[in-house]
Amino acid sequence: MELIVLTPEKEIFQGAVDSVRVPGSNGQFEILNGHAPIVSSLVTGPVRIIVSNGENKVFNISKGFIEVLNNDVSLLVQGVEEEVAEN
């Protein structure tokens, strides 16, 4: 599936991913390939991404929204507080 992470200032990430775990306003949840369409608000917290090449990425975001439709995932966030690379 394809993920794009955007702030009002810039694009943070775009590419093929295996999973995305986000801090939803009702608790953390994970998006996997074939996920049902969804729009949800996000709170401040970590976004954990498993990139298709096996690389792990973690972004600490300010609040925002996620939209999932036809294996396209869009994260629209107010800001990224910190980028941490995990392997």
Image (spheres, rainbow, N blue to C red):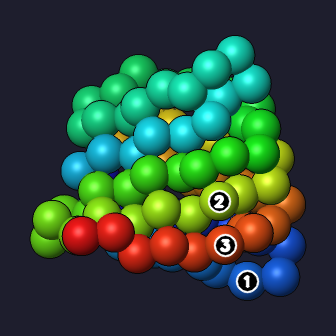
Callout 1: 10 Å neighbours few (<14), some, many (20+)?
A: few
Q: Residues within 10 Å of mark 2 (few under 14, many from 20)?
A: some
Q: Dots 2 and 3: beta carbons under 8 Å? A: yes
Position in image of residue 31 (x %, y %)? 39, 34
x and y, in percent, of residue 36 in the image: 41, 22
Confirm or deny contact between disc 3 and disc 1 (CB under 8 A).
no
Q: CB of mark 1 within 8 Å of CB of mark 2?
A: no
Compared across the picture, whether 53 is left or right of 41 comes to left
Q: Residue at x 38, y 56 (%)?
A: 49
Q: Considering only vertical position in the picture, is 72 above or below 9? A: above
Residue position marked by numbered label 3 in the rendering: 82
Image quarter of residue 57: bottom left
Asked whether the viewer can see residue 59, the reply is yes
Circle 3: element type: strand
Q: Amino acid at mark 3?
A: Glu
Circle 1: residue type: Lys
Q: Examine the rendering and report whether any part of residue 67 can be seen.
A: no
Location of residue 1 in the rendering, given as x and y in whole percent from the top left corner:
29, 52
Cα gap from disc 2 to disc 3, whole angstroms = 5 Å
- Residue that mark 1 sits on: 10
Residue under pointer 2: 60
